[in-house]
């Protein structure tokens, strides 16, 4: 056998350490470029358009009509804000009230009903699970049928009512909620169910006392995501809740544009006002959204 000298082994370990450091340096440089690219994309896609909205909302009518990315020559913050609020007898305030009622009602039903359906589908295997799962997935794929839906709402005397629109929003958002809740419930041990049943808990008590409190991470995700979706919805209120007094915040954009003239300063001020609530919600709950989406990804 040939003996390996200590100097040879030391040089080999030194060279391997050098190669490892070089690979680590290349990975750091690659991650730096990816981070810079992500920041640049975020700036182009989100920050620049938002800055354009803010600048245009602060301009006078003449400068706003140019639609240029320039600083306002004359700031009209208070004037534009008052003009937007006073349009059509404070319709924006009524629209905020309608959108708040719509969002709170829809999301509350989505969280409660979606979690209950997901719990039953995950815990009770039966021959109906396959068709029900197919219907849930179909709700994510099949586009809505506007005319038949209007006919159904008219038959139920719910057309042009907030109650009818809440049912529409719940029907469109429920499949997404069920999938999230079901993925999270699969990580909850069944031994908790068995212990609660041994203690005498019925189905409703088992769910609301044991399971539902554990769904807080994914429930926050559902609340934030669906609140933004419902609050920013434009097409459903346009089709199923017509009428000026039934307007939601997105429909108030029609107030400042017409076939021949458009008040761009008021239009962008309106866009800014209706963008602030969902933006603030995302800024405060962005980490909880990611945690809720990934909490059911790994079982165990």
Image (cartoon, rainbow, N blue to C red):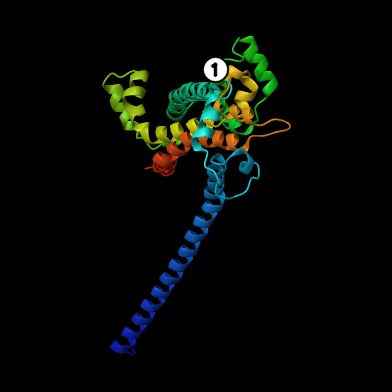
Q: Residue 176: in sight, yes or no?
A: no
Residue 192 sits in quarter:
top left
- Where is residue 98? Give x, y as percent: 51, 21
- In this view, the residue farthest toward the front is 74
Which of the two residues, 236 or 268, is positioned nearer the viewer here?
268
User: Circle 1 sits on which residue?
Assistant: 162
Residue 299, image x, y percentages:
40, 42
Asked whether residue 28 is in view, the answer is yes
Instruction: Name which residue lies at 31% across and 22% down.
Output: 197
Which quadrant: the N terminus?
A: bottom left
Q: Is residue 27 above or below residue 167?
A: below
Q: Which of 250 and 77 is in front in this view?
A: 77
The image position of residue 86, as x and y in percent, is: 54, 24
As drawn, 296 above or below 202: below
Question: Residue at left 57%, top 42%?
Answer: 56
Residue in front for this viewpoint, 231 or 13: 231
Which class describes the residues within 10 Å of circle 1: few (<14), some (14-19), or many (20+)? some
Is the C terminus in the top left, top right, bottom left or bottom right quadrant?
top left
In the current view of this chain or complex, which residue is farthest to the right?
260
Question: Which element carries disc 1, helix, strand or loop?
Answer: helix
Q: Position of residue 289 (x, y in %)?
A: 43, 40
Q: Nearer the viewer, residue 130 or 204?
A: 204
* Residue displayed at 52% across by 57% down: 40
Q: Is residue 242 above or below residue 186?
A: above
Relative side of 186 to 201, left or right: right
**Splitting the image into 4 quarters, where does residue 21 fall?**
bottom left
Q: How many marks?
A: 1
């Amino acid at each position: 056998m040939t003996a390996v000298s200590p100097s040879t082994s030391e040089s080999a370990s030194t060279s391997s350490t050098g190669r490892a450091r070089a690979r680590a340096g290349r990975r750091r440089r690659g991650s730096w470029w990816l981070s810079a690219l992500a920041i640049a994309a975020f700036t182009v896609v989100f920050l620049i358009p938002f800055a354009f909205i803010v600048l245009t909302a602060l301009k006078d009518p003449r400068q706003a009509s140019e639609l240029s990315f320039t600083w306002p020559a004359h700031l009209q913050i208070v004037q534009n804000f008052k003009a937007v609020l006073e349009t059509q007898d404070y319709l924006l305030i009524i629209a905020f009230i309608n959108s708040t009622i719509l969002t709170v009602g829809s999301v509350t039903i989505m969280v409660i009903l979606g979690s209950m359906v997901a719990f039953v589908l995950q815990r009770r295997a039966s021959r109906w699970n396959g068709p029900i799962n197919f219907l849930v997935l179909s709700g994510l794929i099949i586009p809505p049928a506007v005319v038949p839906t209007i006919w159904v709402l008219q038959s139920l005397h719910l057309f042009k009512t907030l109650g009818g629109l809440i049912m529409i929003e719940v029907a469109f958002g429920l499949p997404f909620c069920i999938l999230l809740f079901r993925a999270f419930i699969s990580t909850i041990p069944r031994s908790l169910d068995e212990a609660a049943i041994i203690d005498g808990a019925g189905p409703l008590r088992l769910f609301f006392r044991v399971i539902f409190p554990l769904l807080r991470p994914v429930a926050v995700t559902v609340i934030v995501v669906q609140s933004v979706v419902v609050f920013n919805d434009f097409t459903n209120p346009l089709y199923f809740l017509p009428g000026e007094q039934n307007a939601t915040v997105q429909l108030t954009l029609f107030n400042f544009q017409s076939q021949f003239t458009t008040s761009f300063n008021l239009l962008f001020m309106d866009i800014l006002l209706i963008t602030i609530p969902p933006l603030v919600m995302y800024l405060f709950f962005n980490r909880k959204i990611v945690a809720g989406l990934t909490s059911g990804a790994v079982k165990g």
